[in-house]
Image (cartoon, helix red, strand yellow):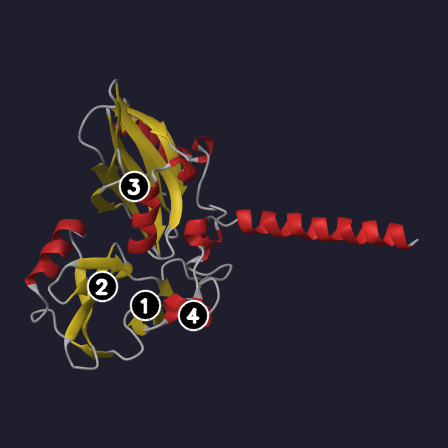
């Protein structure tokens, strides 16, 4: 009896271990966060609500995390005193943005060490950190108040894509007829590769036609935006997250805390891989980030 009970306990422990492993694997490493990122929190109130929120109220708050250290101080600042390099960066990377709020971060000697700039693009709030001279550091992770501790999201919330299940990904065959008809008539020589639907029911279609494109279309079949991602004709191949150069993962983790990996493609010719295009979601904004063959950052483009 003791032997039988002993082996039963071993079997139970093994089952628990397998279950735990499956649970961990359900969430991609890029989507997990730690409580350490909740230091230096800045609350931002918006009159338009949170993207993807089911709330119909006119005001909501999101919280930017990792803004400053325990002994640092924040003060609001207008856009004009912020280094010109910040404006240059925003114009180059967030065309059409609207400035919402700015902060200067000082240390215990009252020396400015960082600037925090909050902008709005495509209805999404984006918080960015810069050095004292205006050099971009990273995009700040956003959380709702109840999610400041823990993984940083809850089911049904605006950031629940961090759970890693990719519920926003849809099969090409499941693209609504009106959307697919508009796309096929307007871009008849494109080959569809991937499709997702954003919280605001905007469809993002990734396609190739010599080069790679991202096309955003409303659920009513109207064009929102189309961007050409890479510059040179090439062969495009889907790449698993684990197969990307380590330098890419390192860069994305540092630059977009809490990001969610969506899809990646390599562009290659007869000589080999030329570059990688990685599609991610950071908070409520979707980006494509380009890297060269060795994983060195080239450019970032907001898609939606």
Number of the label disc, if any, that sits on residue 148 = 4
| Residue 109, quarter of the rendered image | bottom left
Which percent across, then down, holds residue 238? 38, 30
- Please tell me whether mark 2 sits on a helix, a strand or a loop: strand
Whether the residues at callouts 3 and 1 have beta carbons within 8 Å, the answer is no
Dot placed on the residue nearer the N-terminal end, 2 or 3: 2
Q: Name the residue under label 1.
A: 66
- Please tell me whether mark 3 sits on a helix, a strand or a loop: strand
Number of the label disc, if any, that sits on residue 129 = 2
State the residue at coordinates (47%, 48%): 28
Looking at this view, is 60 or 302 the one in front?
302
- Please tell me whether mark 4 sits on a helix, a strand or a loop: loop
Q: Nearer the viewer, mark 1 or mark 4?
A: 1
| Residue 274, quarter of the rendered image | top left
Query: In whole angstroms, how far apart are the C-alphas of marks 3 and 4?
Result: 31 Å
Q: Residues within 10 Å of mark 1 (few under 14, many from 20)?
A: many
Query: In whole angstroms, how far apart are the C-alphas of marks 1 and 4?
Result: 11 Å
Q: Name the residue under label 3.
A: 216
């Amino acid at each position: 009896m003791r032997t039988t009970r002993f082996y039963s306990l071993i079997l139970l422990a093994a089952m628990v271990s397998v279950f735990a492993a499956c649970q961990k694997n359900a969430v991609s490493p890029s989507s997990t966060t730690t409580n350490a990122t909740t230091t230096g929190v800045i609350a931002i109130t918006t009159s338009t609500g949170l993207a993807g929120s089911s709330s119909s109220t006119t005001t909501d708050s999101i919280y930017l995390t990792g803004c400053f250290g325990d002994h640092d101080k924040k003060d609001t600042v207008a856009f004009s005193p912020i280094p010109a390099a910040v404006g240059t960066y925003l114009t180059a990377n967030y065309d059409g943005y609207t400035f919402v709020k700015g902060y200067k971060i000082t240390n215990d000697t009252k020396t400015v060490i960082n600037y925090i700039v909050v902008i709005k693009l495509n209805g999404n709030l984006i918080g960015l950190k810069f050095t004292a001279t205006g050099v971009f550091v990273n995009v700040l992770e956003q959380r709702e108040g109840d999610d400041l501790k823990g993984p940083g999201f809850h089911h049904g919330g605006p950031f629940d894509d961090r759970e890693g299940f990719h519920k926003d990904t849809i099969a090409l065959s499941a693209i609504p007829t009106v959307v697919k008809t508009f796309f096929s008539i307007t871009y008849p020589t494109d080959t569809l590769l991937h499709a997702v639907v954003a919280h605001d029911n905007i469809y993002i279609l990734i396609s190739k036609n010599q080069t790679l494109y991202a096309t955003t279309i409303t659920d009513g079949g109207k064009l929102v935006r189309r961007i050409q991602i890479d510059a040179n004709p090439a062969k495009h191949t889907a790449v698993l997250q684990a197969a990307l150069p380590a330098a890419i993962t390192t860069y994305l983790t540092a630059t977009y805390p809490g990001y969610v990996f969506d899809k990646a493609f390599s562009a290659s010719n007869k000589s080999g891989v030329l570059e990688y295009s990685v599609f991610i979601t950071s908070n409520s904004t979707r980006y494509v980030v380009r890297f060269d063959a060795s994983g060195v950052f080239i450019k970032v483009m907001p898609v939606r």
